Image: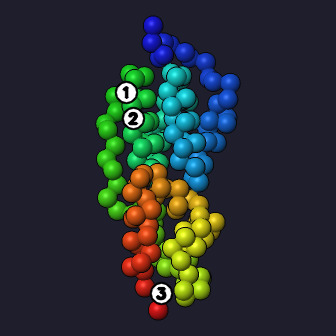
Amino acid sequence: MSNYEERTDLPANFDELKKSINRTANWRERLDAVEELGNWKTRETIELLKYSMAGDSVYKVREAAYRQLLALGENVSKPEPKEEDAVKNTKKILVRIKKSLPKDHSYEEFKEKLKKMRIDVYDTYEGNKGEEFDKWLEQLWSELRTR
């Protein structure tokens, strides 16, 4: 027997999972929700998984939703990683944050302010870049022109 035997009732925490799927500031929580939703083969859970697969800003979450849908017997195509900015106007957002800091601020100060002001941006890129996140963000920070 697999984990995916016909469970047609909704999980007891369905409303919480639905909220988690929409929490833009926590890709890990969205990933956990996708993994848990994959244990329930209902119209509602399949719709949420399709929603995540189609629109999540973090590729790991979209890919996990795809795998869960396949395991539930859905006919879906693997999502492609997005080439463009995962968050619209990322560079403008980062320039604004850099401008708001003292001229001689450190990368760590910039990173902390980004986390405080735009956790959605921070979280999305941290999820997409993985271990390369700090290197990527520091490189971008050093290239940003504010004057």
Which residue is at 59% across, 64% downward? 115
- Where is mark 2, residue-wise? 66
Task: Give the vertical position of 54 relative to 121 (above or below).
Answer: above
Q: Secondary structure at mark 1?
A: helix
**Residue type at the position of mark 3:** Thr
Which residue is at 33% across, 50% downward? 81
The mark that comes first in sequence, 3 or 2, is 2
| Mark 1: few/some/many CA within 10 Å (<14, 14-19, 20+) | some
Residue 128 in percent (x, y) is at: 42, 53
- Report the mark closest to the observer, 3 or 1: 3
| Mark 3: few/some/many CA within 10 Å (<14, 14-19, 20+) | few
Mark 3 to mark 2 CA distance (whole Å): 40 Å
- Rendered image quadrant of residue 65: top left
- Where is mark 3, residue-wise? 146
Task: Give the vertical position of 76 relative to 41 (above or below).
Answer: below
Pointer 3 and pointer 1: residues touching (CB < 8 Å)?
A: no
Pointer 2 and pointer 1: residues touching (CB < 8 Å)?
A: yes
Residue 141 in percent (x, y) is at: 44, 75
